[in-house]
Amino acid sequence: MEMNNSELPDDIEISESHDYQSDSKMNEDNIFTELPDALIITNIHEQVFSDPSSKATFEAVFMDFDETVTFQYLKNFRRARVNFSLPENAVRAKIHLHETEVCNKIIKCYIAQPKFQSQEGETHLQPPPPEKQFLISPPASPPVGWEPVREGEPVINYDLLSALAKLAPGKVILSNLGEVHELHPSSDKHPAIVVHLCEDNPAQSDGPRTQPVRTRCPERSS
């Protein structure tokens, strides 16, 4: 069944032409917005980093594509980062200058790493929640609805630390048995705690050591 344009209602219009040029322009803009606006230049001549005239010649090559271009030089790597105002300028410079001779060196141009931004606009990772688990670890495969048990911070026993600090060598008492260190004085309810130092016996330390007497193995009858 055929229907002429005269048979259509007045509020319906047929568009016989389509602006394909605007669609292609929109797609091109979307492609460029996803690209970075910087290039990484490698294999740069050493004179570019030390000679001002060579440096000016190097920069003039990229200024032909963007007058507001900026440079970040990495002398130890013989590289440079070239920042353009628009991504399309960076792409155009990459196409024309890749593997071309600049200052007596064949340079190579690479697109810098693109910048990925989250939907919220945050470009950095968020720190973990300020809760520290000291001894509790999550299971290998947590079940549905598992939540870590909130654990308190380690308890510091200051009484124990104070008692350990008092165990240093205390009062020295000289007796016929030698030096005696009193670690804890005596009281009405507790005796004193003393440590007697054992001295080496000079008779055992000096002189040759005696060897045990070897006995002959009894003969065996064949």
Image: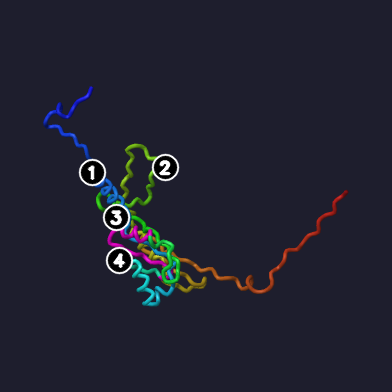
Cα distance between the residues tagged 4 and 3? 24 Å
Cα distance between the residues tagged 1 and 2? 58 Å
Q: Is residue 10 visible?
A: yes
Figure coloring: rainbow
The residue located at (41%, 65%) in the rendering is 167
Between 11 and 167, which is closer to the camera in this rendering?
A: 11
Placement of 204 over or under 119, stated as above or below: below
Q: Please say if the residues under marks 1 and 4 sit with CB atoms less than 8 Å apart.
A: no
Q: Earlier in the sequence, mark 1 or mark 4?
A: 1
Residue located beneath label 1 in the image: 19
Residue at the limit of the structure toward the top, as seen here: 1
Give the residue type at disc 2: Ala
Residue located beneath label 4 in the image: 69
Element under disc 4: loop
Magenta range is 75-95
Residue located beneath label 3 in the image: 123
Give the residue type at disc 1: Asp
Residue located beneath label 2 in the image: 140
Between 197 and 147, which is closer to the camera in this rendering?
A: 147
Cα distance between the residues tagged 1 and 3? 37 Å
The part of the image, by quadrant, that contains residue 145 is top left
Q: Please say if the residues under marks 2 and 3 sit with CB atoms less than 8 Å apart.
A: no
Q: Nearer the viewer, mark 1 or mark 4?
A: 1
The picture places residue 75, in percent across and down from the top left corner, at 41, 71
Element under disc 1: loop
- Judge from the rendering whether residue 215 lies leftward or rightward of residue 68; answer left or right: right
Q: Earlier in the sequence, mark 2 or mark 4?
A: 4
Q: Nearer the viewer, mark 1 or mark 3?
A: 1
